[in-house]
Image (cartoon, rainbow, N blue to C red):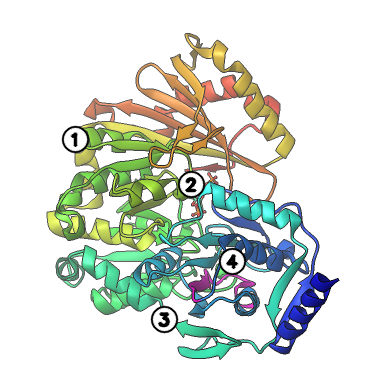
Amino acid sequence: MDGLISTINSIKRESDMGIQIIATRPFNDQRPGTSGLRKKVSCFQQPGYLENFVQSIFDVIGDLKKETIVLGGDGRYYNRKAIQTIIKMAAANGIGRTMVALRGIISTPAASCVIRKYSLKGGIILSASHNPGGPEGDFGVKYDIENGGPSPEQLTEAIYRRSLEIDRYRIFDGPDVDLERVSEDHMGDMVVEVFDPIVDYVGLMEQLFDFDQIRELLSSGNFSMVFDAMNASTGPYARAIFEEVLNAPKAAVINAVPLPDFGGIHPDPNLKYARRLLEIMNSEDAPDFGAASDGDGDRNMILGRRFFVTPSDSLAVLAANAHLVPGYSKGLSGIARSMPTSMAPDIVAKDLGIPCYETPTGWKFFGNLLDAGRITLCGEESFGTGSDHLREKDGLWAVLFWLNIMAATGKSVQEIVEGHWRRFGRNFYSRHDYEGLEVDAANALMDHLRESLSDLVGRHFGGYEVEDADEFCYRDPVDGSLSTGQGIRIVFKKKSRIVFRLSGTGTVGATLRIYFERYEKDPLIHHQDIQKALSGLITAAGQIAQIRDYTGRDAPSLIT
Ligand code: G16
């Protein structure tokens, strides 16, 4: 009885302070995927859906008094509404200060930068990354921890478990915050600061790269570039860096204004979706350099004149040329790549005499290696590259890294990459995606692969002999944690392999990703068409996984 009375009194006290405690019921689908919780906007619009997940985060991260978090998103539809809700929930959950990004927009790398620079408790980033936006599109929520990186798996699992038992959330009954101007105010006991994250991010880039050298290149009149912000979060950052600080001509940044539906663009910087950029870079009078970033600014695509750089090659090239860039001139401690990423970076690491780690897909797996100082650079085939300057991948950072190398060497993108292949050999690489599959069919295909692993060794497919086959699992060398079921690897003789895994970021059905790789030392073969060079492996994948039988599809829906 005493307990009940004290609970009633405490609810009354809180209600007098403007804090409401709202009864809710769990949703059973709030397990974060590769990078946070991603669902259709309509799913997040269900009463209590966003609130339950955010309350689960607050419940799990513990004592928040006197703590500061950063809050913002990639500007997609529902961003502003969700931000207002989360500010009020933060106030009701006893958070000391919430730093809210101006206009509610912050790129994922800028959030990581702010968390690290001001030693914050963490950050809530509202983003579905490269997924389409608008009312019919996707929305997402992810929590970054105090090192500025994505929540590790143990934390996302704890948040998920909490979401299954949640029965109430806390929210402050107050007015919306004006996100249009920099300000500092109170909501209950919490300080709400609206701030401009661009300044801190640009400052960090200035420390890493030779801005004078890049400025000379961009304003020389002999060099042209175009950066496609895809109507997403990087537009204002890119304008500040390229046009204002580095004196690039005004037209250097296209699709520069963040829009809630990304102007109808699918904000994924790859050969299918960065259409306008590709048209420009494939035209007769193409600029010297082209690049794009995704919805939340952590991915990058690098292009030369009529020349595409695979993300795997990009990581290898950055590692091989890092000595030319001030922030990395002292050398690299190590490199890491996700397992399906090509082994091109491994070859550079060997040459530099440093370790190369192979981790599961997901930036969160790089966090411990970066924190422990075991690696300086890391990257993934999924258009992500980064370094120990942050704990998230960083699109504009990669673009600046390339510009710095070009400024230092005077070489074009194509010359740099082809020179790299001549020195280290070429890893032909491609990913085929089968999107929107029936979940059961995709799982059945993976089960079939799993069951056939032991029978594959020694057999021939598409002209290749299987040397090894397994399902990747990863023991984190820093904290010893084990992550199983991280993709099926089929390794062939002649330094080739195929990897199969299901995506953890989609919101519709299942996406099967198949990664192909073949190493070629002979420079005479380096200019072969990629799909042709990989055709034997593509045939092999169809035979081994019986793709048509399981999926009913004759061809992938996306080739990158
Ligand atoms: C996220 C993760 C990346 C991962 C990518 C693809 O990127 O942060 O680490 O490589 O998804 O994951 P999956 O193959 O499971 O779809 P982003 O840019 O969407 O945050």
- Residue 39 appears at what percent x and percent y? 67, 57
Taking the magenta stretch, the answer to whether it contains residue 267 is: no
Q: Is residue 280 in view from this perspective?
A: no
Q: Earlier in the sequence, mark 4 or mark 2?
A: 4
Which structural element holds mark 1?
Answer: loop
Q: Nearer the viewer, residue 550 or 470?
A: 470
Q: Is residue 38 left or right of residue 283?
A: right
Q: Residue at point 49% right, 17% down?
A: 462
- Look at mark 4 in the image and give the residue it sits on: 264
Q: Nearer the viewer, residue 242 or 443?
A: 443
Disc 1 and disc 3: Cα gap in Å?
41 Å
Q: Earlier in the sequence, mark 1 or mark 3?
A: 3
Q: Earlier in the sequence, mark 2 or mark 1?
A: 1
Range of residues picked out in magenta = 66-81
Q: Is residue 470 left or right of residue 479?
A: right
Question: Relative to 442, is 113 above or below?
Answer: below
Q: Is residue 503 left or right of residue 528?
A: right
Q: Amino acid at mark 3?
A: Asp
Disc 4 and disc 1: Cα gap in Å?
46 Å
- Look at mark 2 in the image and give the residue it sits on: 362
Q: Nearer the viewer, residue 439 or 303?
A: 439
- Look at mark 3 in the image and give the residue it sits on: 196
Q: Nearer the viewer, residue 222 or 7?
A: 7
- Residue 477 appears at what percent x and percent y? 38, 37
Instruction: Name the front one of labels 3 and 4.
Output: 3
Q: Amino acid at mark 2?
A: Gly
Q: Residue at point 26% right, 57% down?
A: 401
Disc 3 and disc 2: Cα gap in Å?
28 Å
- Look at mark 1 in the image and give the residue it sits on: 353
The N terminus - image quarter: bottom right
Mark 2 residue CB less than 8 A from any atom of ligand 1: yes
How many neighbours does mark 1 have within 10 angstroms: few (below 14), some (14-19), or many (20 or more)? few
